[in-house]
Image (cartoon, rainbow, N blue to C red):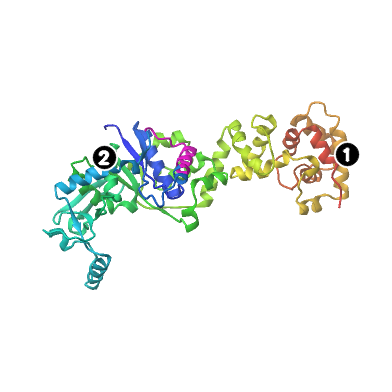
Amino acid sequence: MSEVRVRFAPSPTGVLHLGGARTALFNYLFARHTGGKFLLRIEDTDRERSTDESTQAIIDAMNWLGMHHDEEIVYQSKRIDAHREALDTLIAQKSVYKCYCTAEDRNKAREKAEAEGGSYIHRCDCRDMETEKEEAFVWRFRMPKEGETVFDDIVQGTITTANREIEDLVVARQDGSPLYNFVVVVDDAFQRVTHVVRGKDHLTNTPKQIQIYQALGLPVPKFAHLPLILGLSKRLRSAGVESYRDQGYLASGLNNYISRLGWSHGDQEIFTFAEIIEKFDLKDVNRSEGSLDMQKMEWVNQQHLQNCDGAMLAELVVPFLAKEGIVVNAADGKLLAAVETMRARAKTLVELAQNMKFYFVADDQLEFDEKARAKFYTETAVTYLQEMAENLAEVSEWTEEAISENVNTYIAQKGIKLKDVAQPSRVALVGRAAGPGLWETMAVLGKESSLKRLTQAKSE
């Protein structure tokens, strides 16, 4: 196989949503798997809706996901001269014609076709007109009337379209400004794209574009049309990748999840990014649509939280702790230790930060679950906590083992059970009834904070 060259070509009119991210990811994976090139083109010819802010947001989202492009970004708006030169070629060889039909003309033709039980395919008398009019017009591509346009789609199989069913599409306005199906061909050829990997919603565009490739004498790339993603509500369709980042998803978790929306490798569910690249092949992409499942996305992200390097996870959770009012340095040893005690209990970085902030708040500012405090702070339990703190004050080396030995000696001497002090202690240390083990909690909190929180417990 010659060098694979694929592109992701978003329009900068909004954020990078999950569907776009999945398309970008499959292009990126295919390029990396084959040792090819991943290209980025910004299709910004819609100047009214395209913004620099959207362009930067898309680039930032792709960088966060780890999808870095290999060559200079191509901005479609800067290639207008090349588009018009290609249009001139089509005009010179009479592959396009001036169409003077108005919107009213087209509506009448559509109504007539529907009344006769057919579908509307724009083919008008303008196509064979020998004299020109002094009226507004658009440039339409002269589609062949006979034969078929056939291509082998890597995902969807062989696609055959009768040419009579393909309309004479508009390729440019009267002023020469080109439209999508035309410029995408010119720009893909300019970037030497070998494989066009995009959503199945573009499938009907492909026969039209193939005819334009052929008219311009350009090599036709291979096509792979990806299944759509079902279950995307209006809210989820409009949510950008950055919203998932802000909700505390890991880039590795999100990549893992969206890669499985249409692609599979046996029964394996959890992949590192390197594993996906190694195993990915367009031939393994399913034709059937994948369904978005937010619970499954959370579960996949949770697995990546568990597998993430501890130091990296500590660094990633820092900005989420800051949103909780906790300022801590990523290199703080206490942070890493705290992360290790709490990572198994979190699905996202937001949840991790919220669950572990008790380690870093001032002892007298600890927030309590009042129901837990009312339930477990009995007069007897509070007495136990005070006595435990007095005994623990004698521990010289503050480790989990030493703490465990000291507390177990105390409860043996009192003739009570661990459960008599476990939940009251957890409420005193964490602020709620759920949390990590007592010994590891106190070891991370440190001796001073642990003793203070135990002694300040008071019965209701």
Q: Looking at numbered disc 2 in the image, what kind of residue is underneath it?
A: Ala
- Residue 154 visible in the shown view: no
- Residue 355 visible in the shown view: yes
Give SS at disc 2.
helix
Relative horizontal placement of residue 331, taking residue 284 as reference (left or right): right
Tell me how far mark 1 sits from mark 2, CA to CA: 79 Å
Relative to 132, residue 271 above or below: above
Instruction: Residue 96: give x, y in percent of width and height.
Output: 18, 52
Q: Looking at numbered disc 1 in the image, what kind of residue is underneath it?
A: Glu
Q: Which mark is residue 358?
A: none
| Magenta-drawn segment | 56-71
Q: Quadrant of residue 364?
A: top right
Give SS at disc 1.
helix
User: Which residue corresponds to mark 1?
Assistant: 387
User: Which residue corresponds to mark 2?
Assistant: 189
Chief secondary structure of the magenta portion: helix
Instruction: Residue 78: give x, y in percent of width and height.
Output: 34, 41
- In the image, residue 100 lies in the stretch drawn in magenta: no
Q: Residue furthest bottom?
A: 115
Q: Nearer the viewer, residue 315 or 29?
A: 315
Relative horizontal placement of residue 289, taking residue 295 as reference (left or right): left
